[in-house]
Amino acid sequence: MLRKRGSFIFCGTFLFVTWNAILVLLLWGRPQPGQPGQPGEASQEQGAPLEILSDDVVGDVLRMADTFEAELERQKDILLQIQKHQPLWESSNANKVKAVAPKQPIIPILVIACNRVTVRRCVDKLLQHRPSAEHFPIIVSQDCGHAETAEVIRSYGDKVTHLKQPDLSDIAVRPEHKKFKGYYKISRHYRWALNQVFRTLSHSSVVIVEDDLEVAPDFFEYFRALLPLLKSDPSLWCVSAWNDNGRDGYVDPGKADLLYRTDFFPGLGWMVVREVWDELEPKWPASFWDDWMRQPEQRRDRSCIRPEVSRTLTFGRQGVSLGQFFDKYLRYIKLNTEFVPFTKLDLSYLKEETYKQNFEKEVYSAPVVTYEAVKQGQLTGPGPFRLQYSSKDSFKMMAKNLGVMDDLKSGVPRAGYRGVVSFISRGRRIYLAPPPGWSKYDPTWS
């Protein structure tokens, strides 16, 4: 501030001194009476009247003095204006700094861990790609009490916060659920860990990853850019880094910046805000929390944001799910490798009404094709194309045979939006879609 004020005073003083120097040079440069060789003037030796010449010179000097005095007053006024407006300029500059560099939010990354020492791969990638420790603190919450895993987490020192779930007691379940006891413990852990983030540490948002996930280079950029939209759009309740149909060959790698709304809760690297947790926590389920999230009572017709190309990759085949879907789908998921500057992009197209209108227009203006034509690669033209299903069975048959995940949760297909599943088949965009006029999901389709 003092440096700016000194600069303004220096500029005013410089103008004042420069003007005075010019005036002095002009006066010195004028010919004096009695100097020989000057046109229009006579010397004393030639007998010219000294009185007449002196009067002319005096008149010129007086006129120059008047001009000098007027300019001096003008310079004085300029200096006074500089001093008068100095506070306003300083205030304006301060406002500009605030507008250009707004305060960045703090988005903690919550790593859910248990008994896998391979959590190191997850944490290493998070630390490698993290742009700021201040704005993206990493919290590793460990269940199970596994000593080797705890040692791996401790080895990071103050780079991560290590939380330990204190309740390691057994959970009583009915006999037919004995083999699912792991799901009960996971649900208990999630509830405790999220309460630590939102209640104890008082964060307003969080990104949850499991200990078997690897993140993309723009993982943090993706979530930072989408947090304002998640907070401002009540029709959204999560942002996910995952595309359930994101296998290599089923996505367009040239559209790494393409994002979708989806009615299916994807998980596997997802962001939620405190207000949603305040809504969910009182009724949090004892087990199978992810499928519970996909029920209409929790979703409440809200959507999530998901990418064309996944920003997470799972490497954990072994777990409570016993490798379900891993060998057939998950191991082939394509992890994005291109950094997309999402914070510099206009993401307003994801707002509900805009997105719904544009998406439905594109889907239902696409030409309808047959399953056989898609399956046998007989499509002509660049696409997109619409492949229509009319029942649960027709959806499952076409999805399964085309390599798309065919399971539904409460009637919602994986990665689907308003019943439509988008994917790439042999280089062409396919929309597996219900007939025009779709209005709601049928929960019996499960």
Image (cartoon, rainbow, N blue to C red):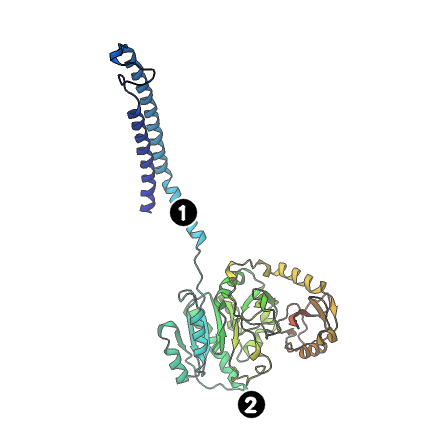
* Residue 217 location (% of width, % of height): 48, 69
- The foreground one among 12 and 431 is 12
The residue lying furthest to the left in this view is: 45
- The foreground one among 55 and 187 is 55
Residues marked 1 and 2 touching at CB (< 8 Å): no
* Residue 438 location (% of width, % of height): 71, 67
Horizontal placement of 139 versus 413: left or right? left
Q: Residue at x 35, y 75 (%)?
A: 157
The residue lying furthest to the bottom in this view is: 175
Q: Is 356 above or below relative to 166?
A: above
- The foreground one among 297 and 266 is 266
Q: Is 40 above or below relative to 445?
A: above
- The foreground one among 303 and 5 is 5
The residue pinned by badge 2 equals 175
Instruction: Report whether residue 109 is seen.
Output: yes
The residue pinned by badge 1 equals 93
* Residue 98 location (% of width, % of height): 42, 52
Q: In the figure, residue 155 lies in which quadrant?
A: bottom left
Q: Residue at x 34, y 24 (%)?
A: 67
Mark 1 vs mark 2: which is more N-terminal? 1
State the SS at label 1: helix
Say what amino acid the circle numbered 1 marks.
Asn
Mark 2: few, some, or many residues within 10 Å (few <14, many ≥20)?
few
CA separation in Å, label 1 and label 2: 69 Å
Camera-side mark, 1 or 2: 1
